[in-house]
Image: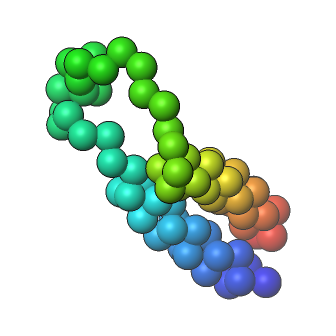
Amino acid sequence: MTTFWLVAQIVLAVLITGAVLLQSQGGGLGAAWGGGGETYHTRRGLEKVVFYLTIVLVGLFTLVSVAVLASQ
């Protein structure tokens, strides 16, 4: 059963990486410290779906990580 949880954890890690990379914020590294120029940004359409999907995947990853610890 531990193997199942570890494989699930790897798959979720790859999916989270892909979801984060799909989120295009633009502006480069300067935007991380407030240099993006935009004061407010509304997520719409596919960007909103990818954002919420990322949150769900991280929640699942957390639960699977706890399951891995519990199964050892």
List x then y, in percent, for residue 50: 53, 55
Q: How is this picture coloured?
A: rainbow
User: In front: 17, or 10?
Assistant: 17
Taking the image as shown, residue 52 lies to the left or right of residue 4, namely: left
Looking at the rendered image, the quarter that the C terminus falls into is bottom right
Residue 62: in sight, yes or no? no
Q: Which residue is at 70% across, 75% downward?
A: 5
Q: Which residue is at 71% across, 83% downward?
A: 4
User: From what the image shows, is residue 30 above or below residue 8?
Assistant: above
- Total numbered labels: 0
User: From what the image shows, is residue 52 above or below residue 42?
Assistant: below
Q: Which residue is at 42% across, 20% downward?
A: 40
Q: Residue furthest front?
A: 45
User: In front: 39, or 5?
Assistant: 39
Q: Which residue is at 65% across, 76% downward?
A: 8
Taking the image as shown, residue 8 lies to the left or right of residue 70, namely: left
User: From what the image shows, is residue 16 above or below residue 29?
Assistant: below
User: From what the image shows, is residue 35 above or below residue 7?
Assistant: above
List x then y, in percent, for residue 49: 58, 54
List x then y, in percent, for residue 37: 23, 18
